[in-house]
Image (spheres, rainbow, N blue to C red):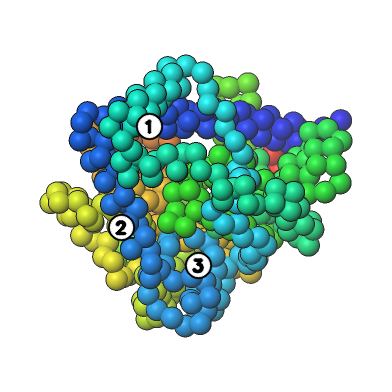
Amino acid sequence: MASYIEVMRQAVIALTVEADKRATRDDVRKMLAGAAATIRAPKGGFDSMMDGIASGLAFEKSESADWLDADAILNGQSGPFDACDLEMWLAICKRLGVATVPGEVILRLNRVESELVSGESEIPPGRSRDALIAAMNEMIEKADRDGVTPEMLDLFNYLFDTAEQDAVDREELQERLASSMDEVPEGYMVRTAACGGSELKALAGTGLAGPTTPETRFGTDLEVGPGWVRLGNRRTLNTRDHRTVSMTMQRPKSDLVFIARPWVQASRWIETMDPHRDGSPFAGPGRWPAEWRAFIVNGNCVGVSFYYGFTGEMNPENARMALEVRDTAQRLVDGMMEQKLWPRYMKAEFARRSPHAEMQAALADFGRETVSCSLDFIETDQGLLLIEGGPANTPIGGAHVCSFAGAGLKKGAVDGRLMAKSSYGVAFRAMPHINMMEPRTWHDGDRTGSIATWAETEALALTEDAPVAVGEEPKRGIVARLFGRK
């Protein structure tokens, strides 16, 4: 009989897969609507839109042309790199001698191969598809009447030319997906250079990932693990995850790079009720590893936050750990500054092109030739290990603010995108009024017991921990018992 944890994992994974399907359908509908609007633009509008797209692609290509790859970083070169690429961060840690959760590239797929393995989405019936068909018919009639413009030809080739895909051996490609897993040890997870998959993110977020690799069976011939699927007796890479595909395609190089990593066990866990499942049939407690996020602005670690915003507590032990995270992050950043390794976030680089003074002012603290980023750490028996790096928390997007949610924002002034204006100091947990799933709650408020200044954190770290009575056993909650942990 399946255990409680196994049943809950099955439910969360099933719900995540269904959510992925809905998100994909929504993406397709939005794409169709946008394509129809572009094609049916008034005279001159279509050409203008095509010029804008071409200009954006040209800028992206030019901007990323000199971004370093992992080999260049390991060979001692200096320059910018993609802040959203785990492979780059692993290379930087190896170059600088920084302790990290290890990882090894097991497969690379180019853009065409990535498109093929990411699955095909059937265009859903409805107004969006009808609008696209009508717009395409108008475009064909216009081409018959006025001739085919170069822009129209480019669009037709992009939509209908399948020569590159036809040249790929599909069976060989599927075999590579499976054979790349053959040498990956049991107990490992797989993710792409861009991100971890939806299922893993869902299990971790709901406190159901656990201290060992979360491998969930759905019958005798199907098992889902972090980043892979076992069909029968053989594992293969999961390439159809919506989060993985969408985040990969947003990067300058839309190739899929798969990285295998050991499932590192945290040395400290926090057990509490899971707010994501609150009020649902799956309501209950969860167990989260002690993980932290450091926020770097212009070469300085300005803030540190508990990664899971509802799990932390403002106490001396966590204050000391927050200071250790700050110091560890700063040592890595100092090394990057010395070696002139600059994290770049393409969305911010696009924003720098804006002629608006407001946009330029928003990015004033995030220079191009400096280190601004986010750094995630996990507490282990070997000390703090870097999980990954990422983009900075900028006013136009980037890193999630974790426990800083709402900091610096005025009530009623939130537009639903900006979660915090400030990530300075230490955020042990989100402020009491914050609901991570409800944008209307993302505003500043009573920070007592939640967010502290560095001076307050340093003072707290010098105080003694709450005494433990002689003979008193450590608290062991229901989730710890269900996971079989003491």
Residue drawn at (34%, 53%), measured in percent from left and top?
A: 57
SS for tag 3? helix
Q: Nearer the viewer, residue 62 or 169?
A: 169
Residue under numbered circle 2: 59
Q: Which mark is residue 35?
A: 1
- The residues tagged by marks 1 and 2 sit, at their Cα atoms, a distance apart of 22 Å
Q: Position of residue 319 (x, y in %)?
A: 45, 59
Q: Is residue 278 above or below residue 326?
A: above
Q: Front-most of 157 and 13?
A: 157
| Element assignment for label 1 | helix
Q: Which numbered circle lies on residue 88?
A: 3
Going from the N terminus, do you reach mark 1 or mark 2 first? Answer: 1
Q: Residue at x 66, y 48 (%)?
A: 227
Residue 291, position as x, y percentages in the image: 54, 54
Question: Hey, which residue is sitting farthest top in the picture?
Answer: 126
Q: Is residue 386 above or below residue 138?
A: below
Q: Residue 365: x and y, percent?
A: 23, 61
Q: CA distance from mark 3 to mark 1?
A: 35 Å
Q: Is residue 225 visible?
A: yes
Amino acid identity at mark 1: Ala
Q: Look at label 2 and name its amino acid.
A: Phe
Alpha-carbon distance for marks 3 and 2? 22 Å
User: Quarter holding the N terminus?
Assistant: top right
